[in-house]
Image (tube, rainbow, N blue to C red):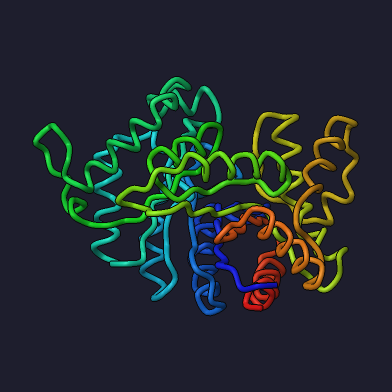
């Protein structure tokens, strides 16, 4: 396939028998490996109160990743802006950009928590996401020194930290109106993804941040020596998603063999099989064909891989194989 920018979002997923601190250290180690493999970015995520995810403070984790690497871009996928005051977010990214100039990305999302309890703990409710566009405008204003309050965001003011909008729900329209790069998924619903991209490109307004549309498509990609081995990489996450849909909690990732030995209810089996379907997974040749197809269909400039699995060595092997594919 033609060369394409390849990046990774690592959500610091916890694994059965391993601790949350281990998951965070795994993310830092993965960033070092991806840098050696030539990946463009490593992004980290924000989740609160989720047993299966250790990444709760993305700007703090981004600082650790950037400090442990030299060239790979580092950012967030994303900071959930409704959870925070835009001034504080600007200050945090200003610090990151000051310490690691030219390497920091600011991916922004609109989620306000997984459960009512988490939202209450954060002092937020679902309605706070409705002001997402205004919050993004305020955040960008702090970098440009246009806040009407007379307050200045130090050290952010005057710095350039590339902002990206995670296109959940109305995100494509917001990214277009603000003239910002957009991240959109998932690869399992190609028609909906293409509609979002078409809307974004059609309504894009050039800005100080981007003169033309920039599309990053995101989703799970798994590469292995055989299709069966690639499918096994998908099993732990598929079961965790099925468990969350049927039990209300998102658990740590189990080994694939334990999942394969489970006796599932009909409802669990339905969600589990659905979780295995629609991803890009297979041998190098199969994945190269699928990736080339989706990149041509969408015109995307970049692919953000979001794969999580129990076996970290198998995951790294997948990323090695994928890097070879993407380099052409």
Taking 268 as reference, is 158 above or below it? below
Percent across and percent down for residue 289 are 78, 66
| Residue depicted at x 46% and y 26% | 119
> Of all residues shown, which one is farthest toward the left?
150
Give the left or right position of residue 194, taking residue 102 as reference.
Answer: right
Give the left or right position of residue 194, taking residue 87 as reference.
Answer: right
> Of all residues shown, which one is farthest toward the front?
202
| Residue depicted at x 22% and y 43% | 142
Quarter of the C terminus within the rendering: bottom right
Taking 276 as reference, is 75 above or below it? below
Q: Looking at the image, which is closer to me, 80 or 290?
A: 290
| Residue depicted at x 36% and y 61% | 104
Taking 182 as reference, is 71 above or below it? below
Quarter of the N terminus within the rendering: bottom right
Percent across and percent down for residue 260 are 87, 51
| Residue depicted at x 35% and y 38% | 136
Give the left or right position of residue 93, taking residue 27 as reference.
Answer: left
Percent across and percent down for residue 309 are 69, 57
Percent across and percent down for residue 277 are 81, 47
Q: Looking at the image, which is closer to me, 62 or 81?
A: 81
Task: State the image quarter where residue 128 is shown.
Answer: top left
Task: State the image quarter where residue 257 is shown.
Answer: bottom right
Give the left or right position of residue 27, taking residue 128 as reference.
Answer: right
Number of marks: 0
Q: Looking at the image, which is closer to me, 258 or 240?
A: 240
């Amino acid at each position: 396939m033609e060369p394409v920018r390849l990046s990774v979002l690592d959500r610091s997923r916890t694994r059965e028998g391993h601790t949350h601190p281990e998951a965070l250290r795994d993310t830092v180690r993965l960033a070092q490996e991806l840098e050696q493999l030539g990946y463009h970015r490593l992004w980290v995520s924000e989740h609160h109160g989720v047993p299966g995810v250790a990444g709760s403070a993305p700007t703090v984790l981004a600082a650790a990743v950037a400090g442990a690497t030299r060239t790979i871009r580092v950012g967030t996928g994303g900071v959930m802006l409704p959870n925070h005051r835009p001034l504080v977010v600007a200050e945090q990214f200003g610090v990151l950009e000051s310490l690691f100039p030219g390497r920091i990305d600011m991916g922004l999302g609109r989620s306000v928590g997984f459960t009512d309890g988490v939202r209450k703990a954060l002092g937020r409710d679902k309605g706070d996401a409705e002001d997402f566009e205004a919050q993004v405008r305020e955040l960008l204003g702090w970098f440009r020194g246009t806040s009407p309050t007379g307050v200045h965001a130090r050290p952010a003011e005057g710095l350039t930290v590339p902002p990206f909008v995670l296109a959940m729900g109305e995100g494509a329209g917001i990214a277009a109106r603000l003239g910002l790069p957009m991240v959109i998924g998932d690869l399992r619903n190609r028609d909906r993804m293409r509609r979002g991209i078409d809307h974004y490109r059609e309504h894009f307004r050039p800005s100080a941040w981007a003169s033309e549309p920039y599309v990053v498509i995101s989703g799970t990609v798994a590469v292995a020596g055989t299709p069966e081995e690639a499918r096994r990489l998908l099993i732990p996450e598929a079961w965790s998603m099925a468990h969350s849909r049927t039990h209300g909690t998102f658990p740590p990732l189990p080994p694939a063999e334990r999942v394969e030995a489970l006796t599932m209810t009909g409802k669990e089996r339905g969600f589990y099989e659905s979780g295995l379907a629609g991803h890009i997974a297979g041998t190098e040749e199969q994945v190269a064909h699928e990736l080339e197809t989706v990149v041509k269909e969408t015109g995307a400039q970049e692919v953000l891989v979001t794969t999580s699995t129990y076996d970290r060595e198998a995951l790294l092997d997948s990323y090695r194989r994928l890097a070879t594919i993407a380099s052409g």
